[in-house]
Image: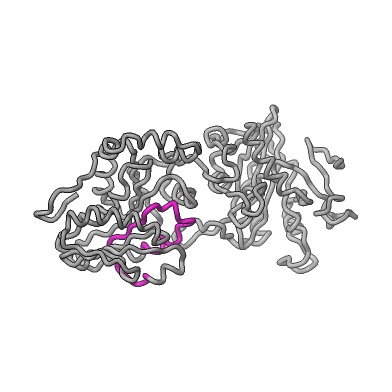
Amino acid sequence: MILPPGTPIAWKPHPGSQTLFLACPVFECLYEGTRGPGKTDALLMSFAQFVGRGFGPEWRGILFRETYKQLADVVKKSKRWFRKFFPNARFLESHADFKWIFPSGEELLLRVGVTEDDYWDYHGHEYPWIGFEELTNWRDLTFFEMMQSCCRSSVPGMPRMVRATCNPYGRGHAAVKERYKLGRAGVPPGTIIKDESGRERTYVHGDIRENTTLLANDPEYMATLEGTKDPNRRKAWLFGDWDIHIGAFLEGAWDPERHVVKPFPIPAHWKLWQAMDWGYAKPYAVGWFAKDPEGKTYLWRELYGIAKDDRGRVQPNVGTKETPDQVAKRILAREAHDERLGYEIGLRLTGPDLFARGGAQYGAQNTHAQTFRRAGLNFRPWWAGPGSRKAGALLVKQALELDELAIFSTCEHTIRTVPALEPDPDDPDDVDTEAEDHCFDMLKAGLMRRTSTPAEAPGADSPDPGSAAAARVLEDGRHLVPR
């Protein structure tokens, strides 16, 4: 950290992550890790190191948290250090101002922002420095990403940077993990990640053991972290472990080291089947399943209809709006070489909505299922009777706990969405249906392999496919009347 001439030395970065964070030349940098390495201090110093460097009022920063109550700790730490470095700096306390003004004119605003609507309060502003404290507190990164458009300056040589800190815990855990490619399946710290526009981002990993000042002044702090009872919180705070799923429906059942496997050739004599969760405005999810002779099920292929923005970035929970005939072509393209390999899909399952006549895109007398059938894909409706959602959710959890399910590492959207699903706030025995649960529904159907007889099947005279009377169970290729 470079301070203006004559500034008393009251703080200096610890060797390791603090030093790396302050020296990072990359436009966007996340400082993540355990509790206690000094992330908040480093975030403040990231801005302060350019105060008094000749940029004057043009060096303007803005630091966000979700609420003003959460900003209290940031304010406290900023007062502790800034008043030592810059004795004539002023902090304006009213929420209308709530900012630091430095003797040479620089400003650091402390603000709250959560949603896309909040962004419009800053649209058109210029902030060469933008900071976010505890990024995993945000449920999604929409506001964070939109604010980056304000990180700009017309002054030649002006640094421009987006900086953030967090621990691996909180509502935004999955979104942050994905953005920076964290965890065992991610990339090492310091790896440059480029988006489609060429803009770069990276991350720095901090560990409490680097903060010798804290450990010397508060020797009991490590014992406090080690004594954390919640195992996921302990892993997050003590080790900075991103391979956890806090509050997730599958918490305690999902283990990527056991359940995510490298692809291998599926033997042709294994039982093969398929399940599809249909979607148009929301994503559709198609999964190919196989069962080995010992009874273990593998999800070995995935087709996911998710939209991307003009930069090629995935838009979570937004569908591609492909018609059934377009999706059928994509499925057939994925199966183009299956016959040569000796693969035969013995069953194709999908939700009863594919058999509904009303609202079909090809007229009231045509269903989506008929469109797929004309393409050669004969889907049957999965069981959607009373209790089916909870039964399927429990089956997924049990299959993971008993190590009876594995997922190929190429099924990226299943791996991205399924472990992160939270319980339904009104029903803890099911997942949150407002979340991106399409791969989970596909996985449930694939594991249950329980069907209903479609009322519109040629020659069929059967009850409504969603009724209990129509239910059939498919086990090893045989249809059994339920007890």
Determine the residue positioned at 17% across, 55% down: 85
User: Where is residue 334 shown, x and y percent of the image?
Assistant: 62, 47
User: Where is residue 203 shown, x and y percent of the image?
Assistant: 35, 46
Viewer can see residue 13: yes
The residue range painted magenta reads 122-148
The residue closer to the viewer here, 243 or 62, is 62
User: Where is residue 94 shown, x and y percent of the image?
Assistant: 32, 69
Going by the image, does 448 lie left or right of 126? right
From what the image shows, is residue 307 above or below residue 479? below
Determine the residue positioned at 24% across, 41% down: 14
Going by the image, does 369 lie left or right of 310? right
Tell me which colouring the rendered structure shows.
one colour
User: Where is residue 161 shown, x and y percent of the image?
Assistant: 29, 57
Residue 202 in magenta?
A: no
Determine the residue positioned at 62% across, 32% down: 403
Count of marks overlaid on the render: 0
